[in-house]
Image (tube, helix red, strand yellow):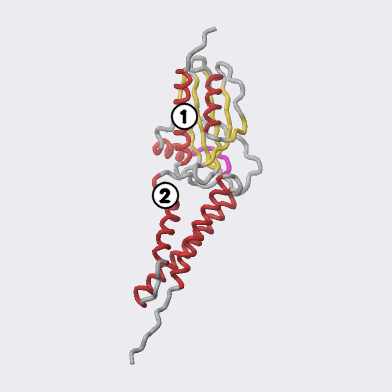
Amino acid sequence: MVAVYPEHVSRSARWSRRLAVFGVVLFLAAAAAHRFERLDTQSFILALGLVALVFASSILAFVYAFYRMWNEGDRVGSNLAVAALVLLAGLTPFAATAYRGFTTPMLNDITTDTESRPVLAVVRDRTPWMNAPRAMRESEAEAQLAAYPQVIGHSYTLPGEKMAQIINGVVAARGWTVLRPFGSVAEGGSATLNAVARSFLVGFPADVAIRIMDDGTATYVDMRSASRYGRHDFGDNAQRIRRFFADLDAAVLADAAKPQVVQ
């Protein structure tokens, strides 16, 4: 008589799959709610911590199920394959963020003028989780200049009032929330616009200040972008400034190409 031993079905494999799927769903739901301002940033950060914990549990279950399959012959069906694919998709944003963290300096406040930064608007109802405004250290200025040499202010031949109009259009097109608009810009004067911008994917908020200075012959535009949360912006603020100036340059060229009406 031949003894037949029943095959053991791996529960760890099933839990690995379930946890991986739950982690992805939780991340997508929290990210969408935060991006569309249905979830505050502090709660979103806590949700990200929970997502990381769920993914870690899924990975542990995956490793144990794989060990049991290899050494004890447990049946895993398609659970491990599904778990691996879902984990790969779910961990990709975290891996991309980690890469940007290793390849960019630990800064959260970037400006085109490190000696005289544009002034940010005062944040109402500031929480302890938010970054407190402070002076820029010399080491931070050096790190910014070394990492982002292309983040500099731009000069235009248009008068300040005209530049303010064009900048207002660029800010509106980018969907930023204006907190304080430009005042009047007389010749030889300056004005600052303050707004809140959000990162593209998950909507982390950043305070933005755009300063224009008209010296009578040219208008100089400087910009500052500072993350409200976290010690590291993962290059987001420098990218925001570069893209803003790319859009502004294009808008200035488009305005120059318009036919002039002679009265």
Report the residue marked by disc 1.
247
Say which quadrant the C terminus sits in: top right
**Foreground residue among 240 and 123:** 240
Mark 1–mark 2 CB contact (< 8 Å): no
User: Residue at position x 51%, y 38% from top?
Assistant: 136
Residue 133 colored in magenta in the image? yes
Element class at badge 1:
helix
- Mark positioned earlier in the residue sequence (1 or 2): 2
Residue 62 colored in magenta in the image? no
**Foreground residue among 202 and 208:** 202
Would you say 94 lies left or right of 194 here? left
Element class at badge 2:
helix
Residue 165 drawn at (x, y percent): 55, 23
Task: Report the disc number at residue 96.
Answer: 2
Q: How many marks?
A: 2
User: Quarter of the image holding residue 88?
Assistant: bottom left
Relative to 102, is 191 above or below?
above
Amino acid residing under circle 2: Ala
Report the span colored magenta. 131-137
Relative to 258, is 122 above or below?
below
Q: Residue furthest right?
A: 125
Amino acid residing under circle 1: Asp
**Foreground residue among 144 and 17:** 17
